[in-house]
Amino acid sequence: MYNDILRFIREVFHEPEDFIPLHAPYFGGNEKKYLNDTIDSTFVSSVGAYVNRFEEMMATITGARYAIAISNGTTALQLSLVAAGVAPGDEVITQPLTFVATANAIVHAGAQPVFIDVDRDTMGLSPAALRTFLTEHAEITDGICRNKKTGHRIFACIPMHTFGFPCRIDEIATICEEYKLVLIEDSAESLGSYYKDVHTGNFGLMGTFSFNGNKTVTCGGGGAIITNDETLAKKLKHLSTTAKIPHAWEFAHDSVGYNFRMPNLNAALACAQLEQLPEILENKKQLAETYARHFDGQKISLVAAIPHAAPNHWLNTLLFPNKEEQQQFLKESNEGKVMTRPAWTLMNRLPMYAHCPHGDLSNAQWLEERLVNIPSSFRTGAAKPYTAS
Ligand SMILES: *Cc1c(COP(=O)(O)O)cnc(C)c1O
């Protein structure tokens, strides 16, 4: 039924018959050289020149004043909540359509997730749904936002830029300010994505990133937090490095810290990858444009960014008219060795999060039944001739 689409994807990747992954890493630069440097220098662990260089590069790329290297995207989210002052029992708003790490990090930080719907077009947190929920459920007393029903403090809001498409983050920031909520952007998927010419992760107090193997660029495993607040930046670095008081030889610590620093080994890989970010983004943009031309005016549509949003095109996303067709395409494509994936199971339907408060989630459900991610890797030049069979 979907032979045409599968054939087209094979043409686009110059891959007539072998397996096509959803998203493969691309190592085309100084990766091996920098990794060797770390081994030659013996600085493979959490202290080293590449860790500092990585932080400088991340600050430059995102335009944030500070970037802190963290062990991965999940711990980056957890630590950002801790550094912002989350307390046990606090509620933290996020979207149900996200990778499970977002909700896990909230719980690891001692808080409870509250799931608010996404917009259909951005697939990220909906400012309208956020406002509806807060109008109905929140009250502000002495500068603290509380959930009238549960009595708990609503501490923070963590929107996520799904598949690299920026959500309406400026509107969300305005609402968060109004309701005294700490805004932390889960930008794990949106390195290189801009909204109104500002890099994602800069709209609230902090933004977090991931360099896991499936992301736009990878360092095996790694993360980062960006912020424009100097005090917070120092606190993040302190807490992520076991809260050790700097001293030439003494081991003294002033709070319960974390071992969340990115090792130099990973930072070396990250630096080599970040050097290639412009090239990778351009390559992925061309792929997205190729897909867009093909699906233009079709019954099965390709998700496009909203006005003022410049996505990184991490994962291209198709929308099917209904669940049956979505399931049929998932079956045919994966059986045909073209890797495709549906959305994550919505957080509110996972056993450990089923009891969490939530608003109306009909857009998330609508998307869950229709969306499919299609192969979106960096395309290398080596073209195999395509032979239709
Ligand atoms: C990948 C990802 C994370 C977690 O990052 P890790 O580095 O794998 O811990 C968090 N949130 C979202 C939305 C992600 O896609």
Image (spheres, rainbow, N blue to C red):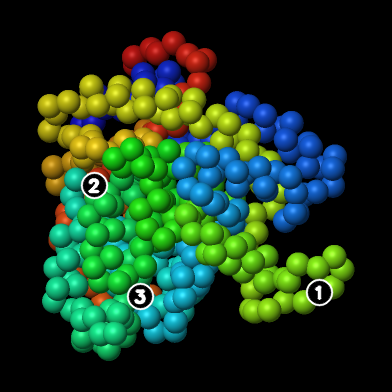
Residue at label 1?
251
Residue 99 place in picture, x, y as percent: 39, 57
Residue 331 place in picture, x, y as percent: 30, 42
Residue 356 place in picture, x, y as percent: 30, 77
The relative height of residue 171 versus residue 296 in the rendered view (above or below) is below
Q: In which quarter of the image is residue 113?
A: bottom left
Of 81 and 304, nearer the camera is: 81
The relative height of residue 13 versus residue 47 in the rendered view (above or below) is above
Query: What kind of element bears circle 3?
Result: strand
Q: How far apart are marks 2 and 1 (CA)?
A: 48 Å
Quadrant containing the N terminus is top left
- Tell me what residue is drawn at x 17 percent, y 71 percent: 133
Residue type marked 3: Phe
Query: What kind of element bears circle 1?
Result: loop
- Tell me what residue is drawn at x 30 percent, y 22 percent: 290
Quadrant containing the C terminus is top left
Residue at label 3?
155
Nearer the N terminus, badge 2 or badge 3? 2
Q: Which of marks 2 and 3 is in front?
A: 3
User: Mark 3 touching mark 1, by CB under 8 A?
Assistant: no
Q: How far apart are marks 3 and 1 (CA)?
A: 34 Å
Task: Classify residue 307 as left or right of residue 181.
Answer: left
Residue type marked 2: Thr
Residue at label 2?
122
Of 334 and 117, nearer the camera is: 117
- The reply to whether residue 245 is visible in this rendering is yes
Residue 14 place in picture, x, y as percent: 43, 18
Nearer the N terminus, badge 2 or badge 1? 2
Of 106 and 370, nearer the camera is: 106
Nearer the N terminus, badge 3 or badge 1? 3
> Can you tell me whether the CB of the residue at mark 3 lies under 8 Å from the nearest atom of ligand 1?
no
Task: Classify residue 220 as left or right of residue 172.
Answer: right
